[in-house]
Image (spheres, helix red, strand yellow):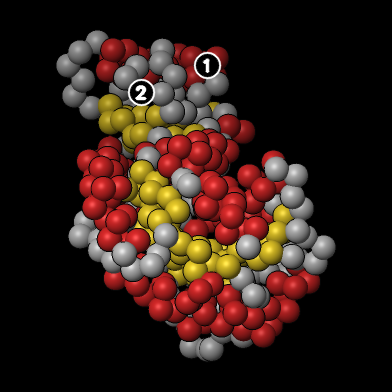
Amino acid sequence: MTTLYVASDRPRAGKTAVSATLARRLRQDGRQVAAFKPFHSPANDGDSDPDAAILAAAAGATAPGDAWPLAMSPDAEPDVARAVGAFREATAGADVAIVEGLSGFDDVSRRLAREMDATVIAVIAYRDGLGVDEARAARQLFGERLAGVVINGVTRYKTREVSEKLAPRVDSQSVRVLATIPEDRRLLGVTAGQIADHLGGRFLSWEEKRDNFVERYIIGGMVLDWGVLYFQQFDNKAVIVRGNRPDLQMATLRTPTACIVLTGGHPPIQYVSYEADEEEVPLIQVDTDTLETAAALESLQERTQFDHPLKHEQFRELMSRHADWDALLGAIAG
């Protein structure tokens, strides 16, 4: 069995997206794939890790339940031996094992990769001023196990600079750049249900469409143009509007909309409720005003997961256009 360990320089760099995308690609190529994650850091006792179900689904398996990942306490040394034992049990019989490793290039990651006899891909989160230090740290930690790095989330106006300047500098450190993935708004999207839960809102209609995907928030405030022209600019949107503005709500309902958040604790008038029901658009009521609601939603995007089919599809497309698949599959083949 070939094992690929996907590490990252920091949390939220894109390990889950890379791991799940590789697992799906290998399954498409006819390989028997197993996915695994050794540890997670729960915010509260008993918290599960949503990445486990995402990885299992990418590998064509059922969610692992409590088998993995193991909860990691900040006050205790991670039990590497136990994690490796769970890994061997979870991946028995597979051709390829994809392991979503730890955030941060530390000794625990090195030990896991060694005990799993894994080839390593390091995901590096792009940010202004990114240099070669992260790639050099990955090489020093993993040595010859390191197949290369994926630079993820490259901002639109830095793509050329990364490909023409940064990538050659990383190569000069004897580290191969396997992909430079641009940032994409869709990967930060949420669902109508996540919005309602985050705001403490109440569904007034179509709660069964909790999975409606939201890429953008549109504020229904001082709309100077005809409302339909304003709201039809974007699909996959959540419109945040005062509950006592039926004019803006009706304009919204004439355009593709994932959900409407009614602020101020005002219930919609009957005609708006009827039209929302006809168009199958969820109405979510919150007590906060529009500005408070919009401000609260800023922190929701900081907690987004790689948890929606549209995100999976988008990242597969980004990988297909911006990754060196010959090098990636070569690393997996050993």
Coordinates of residue 174 in the picture (x, y in percent): 38, 67
The image shows residue 10 at horizontal and vertical percentages of 39, 67
Q: Amino acid at mark 1?
A: Glu
Earlier-in-chain disc, 1 versus 2: 2
Foreground of the two, 258 or 247: 258
Closer-to-camera residue (113/298): 113
When asked about the image quadrant of residue 90, the answer is bottom right
Left or right relative to 130: residue 40: right
Q: Residue at x 36, y 43 (%)?
A: 182
What residue is drawn where x is 37% and y is 19%? 252
Q: Residue furthest bottom?
A: 76
Question: Residue tagged by mark 1?
Answer: 279
Residue 226 in which image quadrant: top left
Q: Residue furthest right?
A: 93
Tell me the SS state at disc 1.
helix
From the image, tell me which residue sits under label 2. 234
